[in-house]
Amino acid sequence: MVLAQGGVVWSLAVLGDGRLVSGDRDGNIKIWPKEGGGAPVVLSQGSWVLSLTVLADGRLASGGHDGMIKIWPKEGTGVPVVLAQGSQVLSLAVLADERLASGSQDGNIKIWPKEGIGEPVVIAQGSGILSLAVLADGRLASGGTDGSIKLWPKEGSGAPAVLAQGSWVRSLAVLKDGRLASGGQDGTIKIWPPDGKGEPVVLSQGSWVWALAALSDGRLATGSQDGTIKIWPKGDTGKPVVLPHGGGVRSLAVLPDGRLVSGGADGNIKIWPKGGTGEPVVLSHGGGVLSLAVLADGRLASGGTDGYIKIWSKEGMGETVILTQGSWVFSLAVLPDGRLASGGGLDGNIKIWPKEGNGEPVVLGTQGSDVKSLTVLRDGRLVSGCADGTIKIWPKEGVGEPVLLSKRSLVYSLTQLADGRLVSGDDVNIKIWPREGTGEPVVLTHGGGVLSLTTLPDGRLASGDTDGTSKLWLVDEQQLVAALCLRAGRNLTRAEWSRYIGSDTPWQPSCRDRPSNWRTVDP
């Protein structure tokens, strides 16, 4: 099911009845049928549709590049109410009292009467307004290009409380506990107290974040290029614990006893005390540490730029097992049977090592490209992702040829459907791979690079494209069969069935619940 907007999609909203609304650079607003079948209702904004929101009474409001706001009748037919903002309408929000608030490039916020009749209340931000949100107490929050967030009195009169983000405020959101979260162009996230008073929680690493790990007590640990590790409080209140690794932190892992381990470009591995205070145990790998993994018996494995994997004794004391990858060890993963898998660069080899580290590894062929990532599926099979865009699913025993899930195309995204099938997105297509990994995938032609994939609660697959389109796909077999029956008006041929449903599901009449005269094609 393809929802082709036809232009760059600037904004999205969901109506009360569940229908999706999209606004684009061509000035079109499209209201799509719930099931995605049939033509959308098309409304004309007349200029770029920069913002959309739904009013309390169910009507749709749209904001345009031409400075006009249009409030559309519920059914999408008839003449809209037109409100003049006077500048590009970058953001829209609905207040607790059901009035519409609009923010524009000229720095003005306008709060409009419910019926859209009469003059609005005008509030001057003083800079371009990029984001709006409504606090739990009904106050309006606005974020501007001057790096400030302003919390406006409920009645829109009087001076606002001013919060300093420090860079363009690209996004605002209200958390369940009433606190306001703001996202800045400099990459920092700030979580503000409900009353706007006091210092915010700043979730900013300050440098590229190479590694993340969840501690056993629920806290988040982040490691970055600047050589620091930050452990963030569970409730996002207070400042993080900062641990100085000393070199760019490329990998993190958590030991069974809850201690955090960091691996850095300085060649050191540091095992930190649980509380984050005190001196760490320091292990010297010898080369920059690119990857870490914890074995089933609790021992730590590290992979480095020196081409070696080292398996350390539990306390870091005693003999270390050294395994030779032969090239940079970009990735490590532990199989369900306890064996360690390692992926290298340059030679492109994946090696599966005996549990004790003694003896020769099983070598899973030469990938021909750096093995950037490894993961293990729920059924125990190993999956590898390479710099050349190939994805391979390997047999459990490492014997035999892998299932190759990508050829010649850069793989941007991966997800798994509810029925266990793997989905990959490349520079043109979405591919849904058979459960058993044999046979051809179902190929959905997207038309551009598939940058993102996710599965919706109703089982449909959603994809985002470099050409500005969002597409919703029917991937549940029974839903898809029914939809194809309605679309074709007849049974599918076996070739069509293989193309649209997949080769791992036996052919059956797609219109089996229809009168016999629908069955017009010989299978």
Image (cartoon, grey):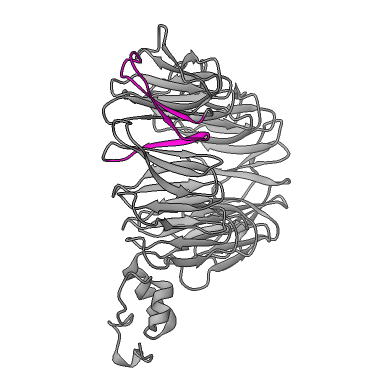
Q: Residue at x 37, y 92 (%)?
A: 520
Front residue of 347/222: it is: 347
State whether residue 52 is above or below residue 34.
above
Q: Residue at x 38, y 23 (%)?
A: 235
Q: Residue at x 30, y 80 (%)?
A: 508
Is residue 320 found inside the magenta-colored segment of the image? yes
Residue 436: percent from the left, percent from the top? 32, 61
Q: Quadrant of residue 185?
A: top right
Tally of numbered discs: 0
Residue 180: percent from the left, percent from the top? 49, 29
Is residue 500 found inside the magenta-colored segment of the image? no
Q: Is residue 269 left or right of residue 44?
A: left
In the rendered image, the residue lying farthest to the front is: 359
State whether residue 185 is above or below residue 375.
above
Front residue of 321/248: it is: 321
Q: Residue at x 34, y 13 (%)?
A: 317
Where the C terminus falls, by quadrant? bottom left
Q: Is residue 204 left or right of residue 337?
A: right
Front residue of 189/250: it is: 250
State whether residue 495 is above or below residue 268.
below
Res 193 seen here: no
Front residue of 203/245: it is: 245
Residue 457: percent from the left, percent from the top? 35, 54
Magenta residues span 307-336
Q: Is residue 135 left or right of residue 409?
A: left
Res 182 seen here: yes
Residue 335: percent from the left, percent from the top? 31, 40
